[in-house]
Image: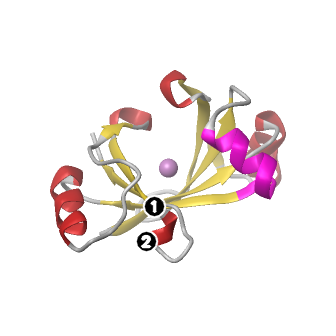
Amino acid sequence: MKLDHIGIAVKDLEESRKFYGQVLGLKVSEPEDLPDRQLKICMVDMGVGGANIELLWPTHPDSAVAKFIDKKGPGMHHICYRVDDVAKKLEEIKAAGVKLIDEAPKPGAHHTLVAFIHPKSSGGVLTELSQPA
Ligand code: CO
């Protein structure tokens, strides 16, 4: 497993894109719409071998990320590990008694397959597993 990205919940996507792009001088992708998750996502590309930053902007007040921002404010939301086979990894960790948010992989950004582990089972850190396209 490798650290793939860190997800950051943002209140203002354009302001965050400016911070990472213009202020820090990093490469920020165009927003990708994920309507089923009520999100727009931008990736901050940290280059080969680096873990990326994923900016998460809620497109609906009822979305999980909007509720997160209401409760805790904007900021670090989750960490994501890259795995070769997310379905297989889910079976392994389920067998270890870990509480999952997603019992099966679902489509993520950039044609990945992803699943989330419940923070109750991961020391309070919302944890995503991602299988590249
Ligand atoms: Co993510």
Residue 16 is at least partly visible in this image: yes
Q: Which residue is drawn at 64% across and 45% down?
A: 55
Residue 29 is at least partly visible in this image: no
Q: Which residues make up the magenta segment?
A: 64-75
Give the side of residue 95 with respect to residue 19, left or right: left
Disc 2, SS: helix
As shown in the figure, which amino acid type bears the numbered disc 1? Answer: His
Is 117 in front, or is 12? 117
Q: Which residue is drawn at 82% across and 38% down?
A: 12
Residue 19, x across and y down, in percent? 81, 49
Which labelled disc corresponds to residue 103?
A: none
Judged by its main secondary structure, the magenta piece is: helix
Q: Do the residues labelled 2 and 1 touch (CB within 8 Å)?
A: yes
Residue 6, x across and y down, in percent? 56, 60
Residue sitting farthest toward the bottom: 123
Which labelled disc corresponds to residue 118?
A: 1
Residue 93, x across and y down, in percent? 24, 67
Which labelled disc corresponds to residue 121?
A: 2
Is 47 in front, or is 38? 38
Q: In this view, does 95 lie above or below 59?
A: below
Residue 118, x across and y down, in percent? 45, 61
Give the side of residue 42 with respect to residue 131, left or right: right
